[in-house]
Amino acid sequence: MGCGGSTLENDSPTGLVLHKRDKITIHLHVGNEVKILAAKPQVILVFGGPGSRKGKLLDDVSHVYGLKLISTESILMEELSEKLDDPKSSKRTEDIASLIKNQPELLKLQRVFNHVCSKMEKEGKNNCFLWDFMPNLKFLMTQFRNVKDCENDFKVFENRFPISFAINFMVTNEKNIMEPQCAVPKKADKAETNTPAGQPKQSDEADTGRLAKRARLYADCVETFTDYFAKREKLVSMDVSSKSKEDIWDKVCEFFSNLEVPHVRNVDTVIFFIFDDKDAQSYNTDFLDAKRVNVCDMAVNISSPPDQIIPAVCKYIDDTYPIQKKFIVDLHASSITKDCMKKDPQKVIQFLDKAENVDVQFYIPLQTKTVQKLPKVSALCSSENEVCLFPMDVPHGLCKYIAGLYRAYKEHVISNSL
């Protein structure tokens, strides 16, 4: 992660100067009564409209802090599907929309709350729930706009499941639309895109206009509920308009840390494995915006086989404060060398195809204003937005094996946290 403030001189023979970027201020307002209630089940309610990246933030928070994520929309779609003649129809969404149009009473707030309570009871009362409150589907969302007073409904709900507080991820600048974060390298844009004759291209202005319209609808729908928590001083308001995903995530982690919520693992990690001093010099690792760690400093015998060293690396990363997502792991002096494997492993690897000739700076920025052309790397990316990078001269089989061990450990941690 980039740090704010100073610019540091470096006596590197390359003459590079380390420039650490300034952090963007993320505005956060925390009500006086915001706290995690002592007794379980614990419930944290979350709001977040179009452009807030609420889905990504909720997914990351739930995995990092071991919270059970539930969604009003998912619960309603499941419950309402049972009222259809054909719940598995390819037109299920349209059929549910038609059902709601004819029977709007199905989305009365107390009925919705009862469905949510039933879901929480099934999941178990020993959990801390992260509740994605407002549906994204318009025909479900608009029903909440008719609610003018929710106090009595929430009192009934909280007799069964007390709510610790609510978080509102706000977008105050509609032009700052957050793009989804993806681990897989982006493909180069084509010089030209064929468009059928007579069919106009969609403009950015039209996209922005639709976003603004949806944002206004969402604001109308959640106003009653955010006001309810604000009056009780149980609302956390965070402005997520900034395009700096790193600083937003930093602020989220800082907030949960202040509440003393322990983290259980890291997410969206990028690990650049280097094997010797030559790799470190070739890639100017001292200037890459990542945490440098050495296996010699970990609680593992460096002469142990890879299937013991790599899990130790994973545990070290999971134990690291979760705002840190990029790591350079130095395998120097360990049993893992570039020639330690002569053939591909037989184990099935849960990673996407290996990408050759990737710019390391696509994943880990170089903290210098001096233009540097670094050697290419190999990248293996999982469907969970986890990336393992290797110098190009590392054999393909070894890359797959190390990445596979890393992914196997992560799956073990995930399964144990469910």
Image: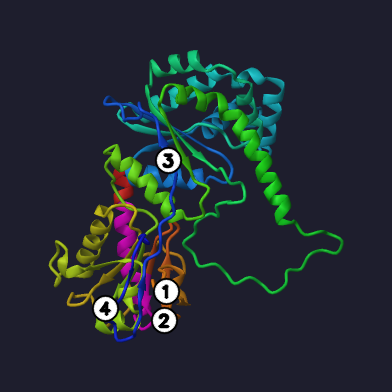
Specify which label sits upstream in the sequence, 2 or 4: 4
* Residue 28, numbered label: 3
Residue 102 pos. (x, y %):
72, 21
Q: Quadrant of residue 135?
A: top right
Examine the rendering and report whether any part of residue 81 can be seen.
no
Q: Amino acid at mark 2?
A: Leu
Q: Nearer the viewer, mark 2 or mark 4?
A: 2
Q: Name the disc covering residue 374, or none.
A: 2
Q: Which residues are magenta?
A: 389-412
**How many neighbours does mark 3 have within 10 angstroms: few (below 14), some (14-19), or many (20 or more)?**
some
Residue lying furthest bottom in this view? 13
Residue 330 belongs to the span the image colors magenta: no
> Which one is earlier in the sequence, the residue at label 3 or at label 1?
3
Q: Nearer the viewer, mark 2 or mark 3?
A: 3
The local secondary structure at tag 3 comes to strand
Let me know if residue 390 is in the magenta part.
Answer: yes
- Identify the amino acid type marked 3: Leu
Residues at marks 2 and 3, CA–CA distance in whole angstroms = 38 Å
Q: Which residue is mark 1?
A: 360
Q: State the mark number for residue 140.
A: none
Q: Regarding mark 4 in the picture, which secondary structure is present there?
A: loop
Q: Which residue is mark 4?
A: 275
Residues tagged 2 and 4 counted as in contact (Cβ below 8 A): no
| First of labels 1, 4 by sequence position | 4
Spot occupied by residue 348 in the image (x, y as percentages of width and height): 37, 64
CB under 8 Å between discs 2 and 1: yes
Dominant secondary-structure state across the stretch colored magenta: helix
Separation (CA) of disc 2 from disc 1? 7 Å
Q: Within 10 angstroms of label 4, few (less than 14), some, or many (20 or more) residues?
A: many
